Amino acid sequence: MTEHVANSLPLQKQAPPQAESLWLDALRRLRQQPLSIFSAILVCVLILTAIFGPLLAPYDPNDIDMANRFAPPSLEHPFGTDDFGRDILSRVMVGARVSLMVGIIAVGLSATVGSALGLLAGYVGRLTDEVIMRAMDIIFAFPAILLAIAIMAALGRGVGNAMIAIGIVYIPIFARITRGSVLSVREEVYIEAARSIGSTDGRIMTRHILPNILSPIIVEITLSLSFAILAEAALSFFGLGTQPPDPSWGRMLSEGRAYFQQSVWLAIFPGLAIMLTVLGFNLLGDGLRDALDPALKT
Amino acid sequence: MNTGYILQRLFSTLIVIFGITFVVFMIIQLVPGDPARVVLGVAASEENVAALRERLGLNRPIWEQYGSWLSELAQGDLGNSLVTGQPVLEQILQRLPATLVLATAGLIVGLLIGLPAGIMSALKPHSPLDTTTSILSQIGVSIPDFWLGILLVLLFSLTLGWLPSQGYTPFSQDPVDWFRHLILPALTVGIISGSIQTRFNRSAMLEVLHQDYIRTARAKGLREALVVNRHALRNALIPIITILGLQLTALLSAVVVVEVVFSWPGLGRLTLEAVLDRDYPLLQGAVFTIATLLALVNLGTDLLYAFIDPRIEYA
């Protein structure tokens, strides 16, 4: 016994590895990836533009100035003007708010409903699991944009309905991810311990399972934001999402289509805004995934 | 191949198709207020609205409407368009070939981009080639499909004047012109699809390259080309085909959008036309056809990779 203690002493003297939380550890790993830092900056710029865009925009985004139609990019109008002489930079800045708002609300809807369904399916199992997951398979059977268009056809045009449509379309992704994660932790000892002290199913699901499966859900939220922003842009491009005169990146591309040859800036800047935003969320999602689960990194 | 697996896959596809019919049927039921009034507008007379309500069967209980819609569907009757009066099935059959051509061409372009790019990246991980490919594929995944289409039109049609900016010529009428019209839409779908494929193919190939049998092949002195072609590529084929199957949904989404950008007369454009005209029977028919087509293609892909890899069973 003494010998055992003596042998183990040097081990005890070694500085134990700093115990960090999963999130602090992930943040440290995230900060080591240059692409993740770049994406975080992109996303921060977008968020700040969405919050302060209407205050910082050099012009009123809906201010018509027919004397300045199709003005090319200049110091006065860095992104040029459109067919109504409206400042494109101001419209792109204000459009950021629409894109981000649609993204956040739509993904919030999918994440809440999808995760709740996935949690229920994975935890309860049997018939509940079968019914929920088959319903998810059915929604998943539709190409995302097609289902969003069909839902918009039923609910009507407008940015609010676009949020609902996009939100419904992405529910199955969250349900599948959550269910998979629940299945992997359902039989863990701490769940059994919670059950043995008489915790209710609701408490086990919300207090014990959910906090332990948050990381894949958070990664999916980041990645889905990019899909949602793309979907909103496509719906607005089709004339179904944001309605005039409110600026939206997809809508701006749709309205400028007839004039792209003579005023190429009408096509460049709103498209670039969409691409950079989506790129930011995609890279951040990838970085988060690698940071939260380094084993997945290739 | 495992017969049980085939039967189970067939059964689950049937359930999905049945579910699709329900979702598609519900489109019209979700319309707030009176769908007949929504179609005809506020200025329509009460008699006309009542007549349309009767024609669409909206006066009957919902389960009865669904039953009769389903029974007509089983007989190939998708109703008539509210705008043209033409049978919906006829319109869909007219547009379907254009969609299939674009989807196939997009898939081929995607494979031509994604397969070599993914494999080359995996063979030289973290090299300048890999980094460039990763950046380009990340941009390809992030670029909105309709914007990419617009940029290609701006460059190849409006600036260089090499290719038509939109429209369609039937193959039977002029094969060369048909092909010229196909290039830009197929390139748009293909670049998006190829970018997604590149990322997945790289991962699949990297995983295979880290297997013990690859190390053994290298250790016994096989040339790298033989290791890659004979051992790695063959084994990477299964995940690559799996990815291809999973990717078809994204591919069809891109096709729907690209058809609108290039005025390509396929089912995607038909769907949007139906939405803008509030032509619900046409919308239901188009959405049902695309989703069912996708379910059947997914079934085919599943069976194909179960055939390639006999270890795959229904889980």
Image (cartoon, rainbow, N blue to C red):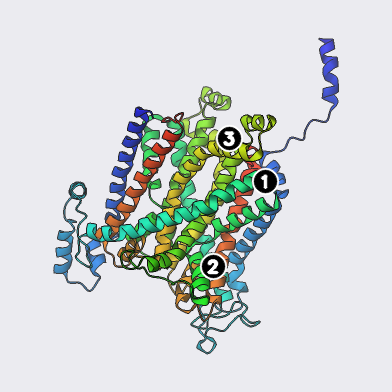
Q: Amino acid at mark 2?
A: Gly
- In front here: B36 or A209? B36
Task: Tell us which disc is closer to us: 3 or 1.
Answer: 3
Q: Residue furthest bottom?
A: A67
**Place of residue B200 in the rendered image (x, y in percent of width and height, measured from the top left):** 55, 46
Number of marks drawn: 3
Q: Amino acid at mark 1?
A: Lys
Q: Secondary structure at mark 2?
A: helix
Residue position marked by numbered label 3 in the rendering = B231
Residue drawn where x is 37% and y is 39% of the image? A134
Q: Which residue is mark 1?
A: B124
Determine the residue located farthest toward the top in the rendered image: A1
Q: Which mark is residue A271?
A: 2
Q: Position of residue A14 (x, y in %)?
A: 84, 28
Residue at 58% x, 48% y is: B118
Q: For marks 1 and 2, give the CA distance.
A: 33 Å
Image coordinates for residue A128, horizontal then vertical, percent: 38, 34
* Subunit under mark 2: A
